[in-house]
Amino acid sequence: MLTLAKIDHLHIRVSDMSKALDWYRRVLGLVPDARYKQLQDGPHGVLMLTNTNATVRLALSEEAAPQNAQAGAIAFGVSGQDFLEWLERLAVERVLGRDGQSIARDSVRDFGFFCAVPFDDPFGNAFEIVSYDHTWLSSKLKLGASQQTQVR
C-alpha cells in the first residue's frame, strides 16, 4: 500500500526575507539549513530553515504580498512541559495571537483532549503550538470545562 512517510517541509510566503529570518530564528529557533543553500538562488529561490535536530523544515520564499496566508495553519506538536515553555517564549517575544492580542496564558485554547495556542508570524501566516498532554496541562494552567473550545 502506498503511504506518506512524513511531512518533509512546508512552504511559507513572506514579504521581507531578512525580517522573516530574524523572526523565525528569534521566536521559533529555526536557522538556515546549509544543505539547501543552493535553493536560495534564482527567481523561485527559497531559504530552507530547520530546527536543531532537523525534524522541522520550513521553505521561505519572498513575495510582495503573500497570498492565501490564512488558508490554514501549521501546527507544531510538543510535550506538555515544552508547551508551557513555548507559551512563555511567545509571550516574551510579544507574538500576536489570531485575535491581535499578545500571547498570554489566556491565549490557550482547550479542546478537551489537547491544548493549542494559535498565533501569526509578522506576514500573516498562521501557526499553532499543540500538546496532547491535556490532563497535565489542565492542572498546570488551571483549565476548566467552561474554557473548552468545540472542535469543528
Image (cartoon, rainbow, N blue to C red):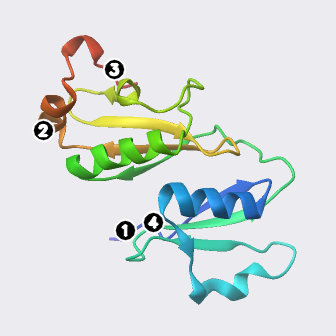
Q: Viewer-nearest of labels 4 and 2?
A: 2
Residue 4 quadrant: bottom left
Which residue has dot 4 on it? 7
Mark 1, other Cα within 10 Å: few <14 / some 14–19 / many ≥20: few
Q: Nearer the viewer, residue 122 or 70?
A: 122
SS for dot 1? loop
Which residue has dot 3 on it? 149
Amino acid of disc 3: Thr
SS for dot 2? helix
Which label was assigned to residue 3?
Answer: 1
x and y percentages locating residue 40 in the rendered image: 75, 79
Write the residue at 59% across / 87% down.
34
Q: Is residue 49 above or below residue 17?
A: below
x and y percentages locating residue 150 in the rendered image: 34, 19
Q: Earlier in the sequence, mark 2 or mark 3?
A: 2
Q: Earlier in the sequence, mark 3 or mark 1?
A: 1
Q: Earlier in the sequence, mark 1 or mark 2?
A: 1
Q: Viewer-nearest of labels 3 and 1?
A: 3
Between the C-alphas of marks 4 and 1, the distance is 12 Å
x and y percentages locating residue 102 in the rendered image: 52, 30
